[in-house]
Amino acid sequence: MIADLRAAGLLEGVEITSGYRDATLNRCEGGSSHSRHMSGGAYDFDLARDADTQALCDFWRRRGPASGFGLGFYDARHLHIDTAGFRTWGEDYT
């Protein structure tokens, strides 16, 4: 999915801030005990200031159901992508 997002030009200027985490690091980070980070199925990104978040959401709406990826925004510049199924959430995790 990340390769597809990159190919679509939607991850330009991003920085990966979290990928695989073992259980100890995941607890330290405050991650869920079922976090996809612990299996390598989740990434967090810091987006560029001019990132087109609407285009990211549109991509997720088109491709998310078939690919089973989740897209969440912690805030306007911090993004989480995972393989836990077609879902989304915002800053309050709902």
Image (cartoon, helix red, strand yellow):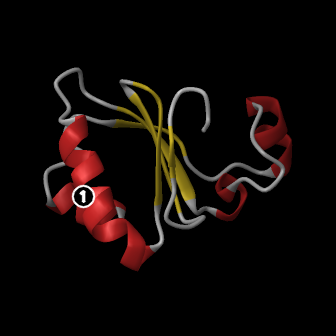
Residue placed farthest to the top in the image?
A: 49
Question: What is the three-letter code of the residue carrying label 1?
Answer: Phe
Check the image and report above or below for 67 versus 59. Answer: below
Q: Position of residue 85 (x, y in %)?
A: 55, 67
* Residue situated in front as seen by the camera: 23 or 33: 33
Residue at the image position 18 percent from the left and 36 percent from the top: 52
Check the image and report above or below for 43 versus 61. Answer: above
Q: Position of residue 39 (x, y in %)?
A: 68, 64
Left or right side of 43 for 28: right
The C terminus lies in quadrant: top right
Left or right side of 72 for 46: left
Residue at the image position 66 percent from the left and 58 percent from the top: 36
How packed mark 1 is, by other alpha carbons closer than 10 Å (few <14, some 14-19, many 20 or more), is some
* Residue situated in front as seen by the camera: 83 or 43: 83
Left or right side of 50 for 93: right
Q: Position of residue 57 (x, y in %)?
A: 29, 48
Number of residue marks: 1
Residue at the image position 16 percent from the left and 62 percent from the top: 7
* Residue situated in front as seen by the camera: 30 or 52: 52
The N terminus lies in quadrant: bottom left
Residue placed farthest to the front in the image?
A: 94
Q: Secondary structure at mark 1?
A: helix
Where is mark 1, residue-wise? 59
Residue at the image position 25 percent from the left and 27 percent from the top: 48
Check the image and report above or below for 68 versus 74. Answer: below
Left or right side of 86 for 39: right
Q: Position of residue 71 (x, y in %)?
A: 45, 50
- Quadrant for residue 14, please give it: top left
